[in-house]
Image: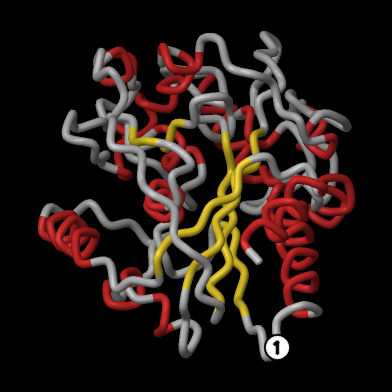
Amino acid sequence: MKKLLIAFANNLGIEYVGIAPAGPYDDLKEILEKRMVRGLKCEFEEDEIKKRIDPSLTLENAKSVIVCLFPYYTGKIEMANLSMYTYGLDYHKIIMEKLEQIGNFLTSRITDFRYKAFVDSGPLVDRYLAYKAGLGFYGINSHLINEKYGSYVFIGYMINNYPFEPDLAIEKTCIQCKKCIQACPGTAINGDFTINPFRCRSYISQKKGDLSQEEEEILRKDKLLFGCDICQDVCPHNERIDKTNLDEFQKNLIPFIDCDELLMISNKEFLRRYKNRAFSWRGKNILIRNDKIIKK
């Protein structure tokens, strides 16, 4: 059944698919507890650690977790003022559609098959799952790094009740050259494979409300209005990577947004034009705010 799963996923353009065990993940629990003590948890993360380490609390009788990588690198565009992961159509929708296709395929072949699929918003730690599934290794900037596509990958996963045989984690890390630490605008990379999300430029660019003077200073260190690619741009593991093999991330690219245009349109019109883009989820006012700060 695992071979059928991989073959079907490959037919969908998913080159990397692996299986993570169903937990509980005691090693991850220790890591998350230490992050909590250090105040490194942000509001985008699941509050309850037990839900982050035990798939059975999300799907009863969970037996394994299917994990898939979705590369999105299309090449650096100098005029861009948006993070590379937002160039294409909203990855949440594209990935979820493919995961649901996998779910339907397995449901038709496995009696009483049940699953829950997630992209970004799930309770588990997606990079940890991808690591446990043998799809990549950790960078010191906390990104997952794949040998072929570097760290420019999205992760989707499916908690399910079939005992697929788990894959083995890749027991290595990045070369720890520390270029990402030196280049990070907010000095958010701690050097121990953790980051301080509250000093991360990407996090700050998506934060609601007024920014502090320190946050504004961090934001002004780059031209991107949404997100940040700096720690990935300087990473040696991303120097000779392949571009994405997925058609969905190769076309309809929007690397640049004109904030003068945004000032002239309503919120409703903004959503009509850009609701199928990942950079739109916070609304147009966040982009306008960031543009004003960067141009100060």
Decide: is 17 above or below 21. above
- What type is the residue that disc 1 sits on? Thr
- Disc 1 element: loop
Decide: is 129 above or below 223. below
**In the drawing, does residue 267 fall left or right of residue 220?**
right
Residue ID at (81%, 53%): 271
Q: Position of residue 101 (x, y in %)?
A: 80, 65
Few, some or many residues within 10 Å of mark 1 (<14, 14–19, 20+): few
Q: How many marks?
A: 1
**In the drawing, does residue 220 fall left or right of residue 98?**
left
**In the drawing, does residue 190 fall left or right of residue 272?**
left
Residue ID at (69%, 21%): 243
Decide: is 216 above or below 134. above
Q: Nearer the viewer, residue 287 or 74?
A: 74
Residue 198 sits in quarter:
top left
Residue 182 sits in quarter:
top left
Q: How is the image coloured?
A: secondary structure
**In the drawing, does residue 255 fall left or right of residue 234?**
right
Q: Nearer the viewer, residue 288 or 103?
A: 103
User: What residue does disc 1 label?
Assistant: 111
Q: Position of residue 161 (x, y in %)?
A: 54, 81
For the N terminus, the quadrant is: bottom right
Q: Nearer the viewer, residue 219 or 278?
A: 278
Residue ID at (75%, 67%): 100
Q: Position of residue 91 (x, y in %)?
A: 70, 48
Q: Position of residue 4 (x, y in %)?
A: 72, 60
Residue ID at (68%, 15%): 75
